[in-house]
Amino acid sequence: MILTFLGTAGSGKTTITSAFGRYLEEEHAVAYVNLDTGAKTLPYSPDLDVRDTITVEEIMEEGFGPNGAIVKSYDRLLGHVNWILERILELDREHDYVLVDTPGQMESFLFHEFGTRIMEGLSEPLVAYLFSPEILRRPPDYCFVRTFAIMIDLRLGVTTVPVLNKVDLMPQGELERHRTLLEDFEYLTARLKLDPSMQGYLAHRLCSFLPEVSPPVRVVYASARDGRGFEELETLAYEHYCTCGDLT
């Protein structure tokens, strides 16, 4: 089973890759893949590490700035994409789980040909889209994260599970509020209808459409610190690869 962690910088991809891997290792053989050319250190030992081929630091020594070096690193990795895919698929055959850690700058994977080529070549990958509680401030924000999960699905052609990470940082009442707004489209739509701004209007229209286009997945509430949500994430991965297909 191949599970890829995707999310913005600071969403906790690398930390949860390591923590979830340790959780799985209690009963399963787990392999780790690092696709982040800019990673300084990793809390896990990668079985495949793209930094063995190219690093952002090496490219910056050629005179590139940080952002340009990140893009250039994936331009150069395109020449190795077939070998990387073969190695990931080999790890998948040899292990129960392969956990794929993607770049800190999500756009360098999501909008670069390297990312799409990798995901197209994998065997039924499941993507966990991580987002943090601090971005959920107003009702339109909940519409945004649910819509963005669908956009990842559309861009990469994969099943994408929204994962609210770092739930250990919030009180129980706040978590329940997030859960309601993320899962109950009817309630969220009603809240958005009260927003007179143009942003509220746009979010209301989008949210009204979400039940029709949302794939059959459920939101996971996770914490790398206390392991919350790990059992649910493991269950989703199993359901994805079995004949069930429905992740609701």
Image (cartoon, grey):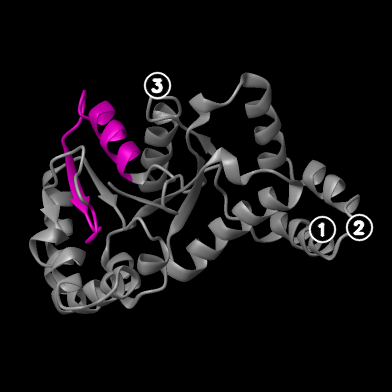
* Residue situated in front as seen by the camera: 127 or 194: 194
Q: Is residue 8 visible?
A: yes
Binning the other alpha carbons within 10 Å of mark 3 as few (below 14), some (14 to 19) or many (20 upward) gives few
* Residue situated in front as seen by the camera: 245 or 4: 4
Check if residue 210 falls in the magenta segment: no
Q: Can residue 55 be seen in this view?
A: no
CA separation in Å, label 2 and label 1 = 6 Å
Which residue is identified by label 3? 226
Q: Residue shown at 8%/60% (left/top)?
A: 52
Whether residue 181 sits left or right of residue 37 in the image: it is right
In the picture shown, does residue 239 fall above or below 202?
above
Position in image of residue 90 (x %, y %): 11, 56
Position in image of residue 223 (x %, y %): 43, 29
- Are circles 2 and 3 on residues that touch, CB within 8 Å? no
CA separation in Å, label 3 and label 1 = 35 Å
Which residue is identified by label 2? 196
Q: In which quarter of the image is residue 38?
A: bottom left
Position in image of residue 130 (x %, y %): 46, 46
Instruction: Give the extent of the magenta segment.
Output: 14-39
Disc with the residue nearer the chain's start (2 vs 3): 2
What kind of residue is marked 3? Asp
Which residue is identified by label 1? 200
In the picture shown, does residue 12 fall above or below 60?
above
- Are circles 2 and 1 on residues that touch, CB within 8 Å? yes
